[in-house]
Image (tube, rainbow, N blue to C red):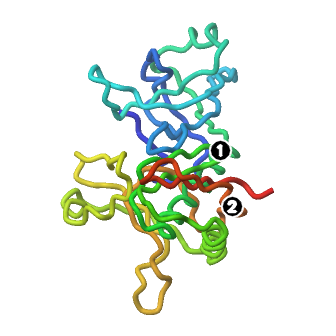
Amino acid sequence: MTLALFRADAYQRECAARVVRIDPVGVVLDRTVFYPTGGGQAGDAGHLVLADGRTLAIADTRKVKDAEGRPTDKIAHVPAAGQEALLATLAPGAGVTAQIDWARRHRLMRFHTATHLLCHLVPYPVDGCSITADAARLDFHMTEPLDKEALGAGLARLVAAAHPLTVGAISDAELDANPSLVKSMSVQPPRGTGSVRTIRIGGEGEGGGDLQIDFQPCGGTHVANTAEIGAVVVTKIEKKSAKTRRVVLGWAA
């Protein structure tokens, strides 16, 4: 497996790693700070710096799939086109420094955290999600109309309130006992290890502390405080079907 360092620290921008193999998808490392496409969030881009100083540009990051098409714990770094000669010089065991495109990753983190705030403002199941560096969207399973101005104002209020975000975990058994924690209808949290990663925004609301805004299983990368999201706005609300309302987020002009 590839040790996924971003799960413990989304702010880590680089790490030393070794090449495990060159997969048809890309370069598999023993550890990485690169987030692979999943849960609606786009995969990271960046560079692998070789021991001699040459750099291999990485255009995307994906999970390697097994023979049955199921994602594994191995993470492949997909080289940008036109680097075949450089790629051919890499061999298993070679040391590299994995460096993410931090500006792009930080935008993904801000948008991903903002989608969790939307889940608080629109308390309906989610049946579609896309998070890129330029825009994000959630598709809510609902029939009621949404007010763009009210939703935008609510989002701005939660951002300005500077709620802290905490990464935690619950057991598979705890998740089974509380199935409503899973907001997504299309993507289920990974199971099998006995522990499921969670994201909590706000506190638990006890003793006069910060009220809990959102709590759900999630494997993506996020900022540490909602204030860090910054100027994110609701750019569009669409009726995608009789039972689907799409909310699109963008950067404020």
Closer to us: 244 or 190: 244
Query: Is label 2 in a helix, a strand or a loop?
Result: strand
> Is the residue 206 above or below the residue 131 in the image?
below
Provide residue 111's location: percent of width, then percent of height.
60, 54
| 212 sits to left or right of 107 | left
Q: Earlier in the sequence, mark 2 or mark 1?
A: 1
Q: Residues within 10 Å of mark 1 (few under 14, many from 20)?
A: many
Query: Is label 1 in a helix, a strand or a loop?
Result: loop
Provide residue 119's location: percent of width, then percent of height.
47, 64
User: Distance of mark 2 from mark 1, alpha carbons?
Assistant: 14 Å
Furthest residue toward right: 253
Closer to us: 197 or 53: 197
Which mark is nearer the camera, 2 or 1?
2
Residue at 66% of width from left, 64% of height from top?
A: 228
Residue at 59% of width from left, 32% of height from top?
A: 97
Residue at 66% of width from left, 50% of height from top?
A: 107
Provide residue 80's location: percent of width, then percent of height.
63, 21
Provide residue 150's location: percent of width, then percent of height.
63, 72
Quarter of the image that includes the C terminus: bottom right
**Hey, what amino acid is under mark 1?**
Ala
Furthest residue toward front: 242
Q: Which residue lies under the disc numbered 2?
A: 233
> Is the residue 226 above or below the residue 212 in the image?
above
Mark sitting on residue 87: none
Q: Which residue lies under the disc numbered 1?
A: 133
**Hey, what amino acid is under mark 2?**
Val
Closer to us: 198 or 128: 128
Quarter of the image that includes the N terminus: top left
| 43 sits to left or right of 127 | right
| Count of labels in the image | 2
Q: Residues within 10 Å of mark 2 (few under 14, many from 20)?
A: many
Closer to us: 116 or 80: 116
